[in-house]
Structures are given as structure tokens and as C-alpha cells.
Image (cartoon, rainbow, N blue to C red):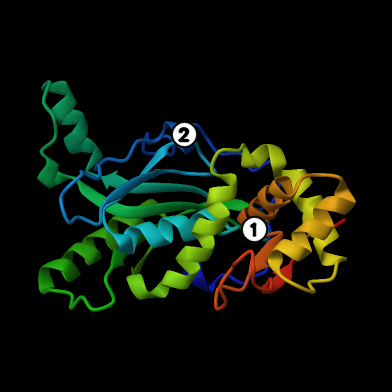
Amino acid sequence: MKILALPLPYSTPPDIWLPHRDAFGWPHGAEYDSFKKARTIRLSTRSTFRGHKFPRRFEALSMNEMRPLFAFGFNPYVVDTRDQYPVYDASAFNNAVLRGKRMPVSSVMTIDIVLTVVLPPDNRIHYHGISIKDANDVLSPATQRRHEREQAAFHARGWTWELLRGNQFSKLAFSNHFMMYRCINKVDVFALYEPSRHFAYALYKSSLRGTMDDVLERLARRQRISLDAGYRLFGVAASFGFVTVNHSMPLRTDAPLHLIGINCDE
């Protein structure tokens, strides 16, 4: 599976159920805790931030990881994102526990990102691992061997895996995602699933004339809500795929609103 090749527009189905833990004991959603942490280091590009779909901290060890973490938060196929996900031999782990020991860190593979995605037509849950590398990185034989081990481990689980390069997530798309993120990072997006779908339908029936501010202000006024509430509903609609933003153009309040499509039934 290629996560960026999944067709758009697409909207996240309602009421997707996730088990409390996956088959290997790691929690979903807010209870998951990254195996590796981003440390504050001078001149470092590492950072930590709060997710908008789940109220937990994400650990980005580089900008190459930060941009896709934001992007996957607005990917309608993605229903959970777990960063720095550990993979290890279960029997070795159990033996260590029986001996009262901890597994050595060298025995644990940490996968940059593991996505939980929902796939049509039956809305089944699937796990997909991703290794992020800089566009200019020349993969050493050691790195290639590690990737082969990661892919083999995921294949044995019935999961999929792929390598993505940092330049597959543009700075412009990151800027657009961050603009929407600022509108919704403190709200319960799942509580706004239906209101955002209705908002997207109203947007579908509306003119896109003028700037983004003009479009959303007209729509908010008709729905008797504030402009801020309109921006929140727009961001949530984009998060669930009711609205698909064209990331080849800047998403700005003072510029026209460029969309690939609106995908909502009413």
C-alpha cells in the first residue's frame, strides 16, 4: 500500500471503532506514548506538539518527521497515528520480563510512524508503517538492511510498510496544515464530525468568490455562527476529508480558497 496514492476526495466513515490496544499490546489514541522522545537540543530541529485528533504529545525527531505527522492528521484515511513505534521479538521480551530485566534498546526497532488506516469498501482497519528519510539521503547498506528488517517484521504481522522521502511533504502543505491546525488543536474534532459535514455541504452550495475570509464569513453569517466557529468547522471538515484542500496553493485568509473537492452526503 502507498499511503499518498490513496484516491481523494474521500471522507472518514463515522463511528470507526479502534481496539484499546493492537495485537502487540500497544495502545491506540491518547494512551499511546512514543517510545523515543524529542529532546531539547541546541540547533536541533526536534520538537513535540499536541495532536488535534488525539489529545497527546507527538514526538518529531526532525522536520522530515514533523511535516508528515501534520499531514497525516488531515488525511481522511488515517484514524490513528503512532510515532516512534517499537517493534521487538515477543519471546525475547517475555524472557526479559521473567528475569526481571529490561530488553536492551539495541534489540528494539523504532518505526518512525505507524498509521492506522480505514480502507474501503468495508472500512476495515489496517496498519501501515513508514520510515521517513531526507530527500538527499543516500541510503547506506546498513540503512537498507534495517529497512529490509522493518519490512519483513511488518510483513510477518500482516501489516504494510514503505519508505517516504521528506520532499514528498512540501513546506507549503505544512504551512497550510499548520494554519488549519491552529484553528482546531484545542477542540474535540470528533464531537464536530456531523456539524463539519453539514458545514462542508453548505460550502459546496456556496460561491467561492473572494478571499477565504469572504467565503467563510458569508457562510458563517448564514449559519448564524461566528467567523472563528466557521474556521473551526472548516479545519475539522478538512481533517475528515469532507473538504480537500489544494496544497499546491497557499491557504491564506486574504487569498482565494483553492479546493480539490468537497465530499459529503446530505
Residue lying at 59% horizontally and 46% vertically, measured from the top left: 184
- Residue 18: x and y in percent read 55, 39
Label 2 with label 1: CB-CB less than 8 Å: no
| Label 2 packing within 10 angstroms: few (<14), some (14-19), many (20+) | some
Circle 1 — which element? helix
Q: Quadrant of residue 101?
A: top left
- Residue 203: x and y in percent read 81, 62
| Label 1 packing within 10 angstroms: few (<14), some (14-19), many (20+) | many
Residue lying at 16% horizontally and 48% vertically, measured from the top left: 41
Q: Is residue 92 above or below residue 221?
A: above
Query: Considering depth in this image, is 177 or 222 the residue closer to the camera?
Result: 222
* Amino acid type, residue under disc 1 in the picture: Ala
Query: Considering depth in this image, is 121 or 51 the residue closer to the camera?
Result: 51
Give the quarter of the figure containing the C terminus. Answer: bottom right
Q: Nearer the viewer, mark 2 or mark 1?
A: 1
Q: Is residue 50 above or below residue 64?
A: above
Residue 90 seen in this snapshot: yes
Residue 265 placement, left or right of 37: right
Residue at the disc numbered 2: 30
* Amino acid type, residue under disc 2 in the picture: Ala
Residue 1 seen in this snapshot: no
Residue 235 placement, left or right of 70: right
Tell me the number on the disc at residue 238: 1
Residue lying at 32% horizontally and 46% vertically, measured from the top left: 85
- Residue 24: x and y in percent read 36, 38
- Residue 27: x and y in percent read 42, 34
**Residue placed farthest to the front in the image?**
254
Tell me the number on the disc at residue 59: none
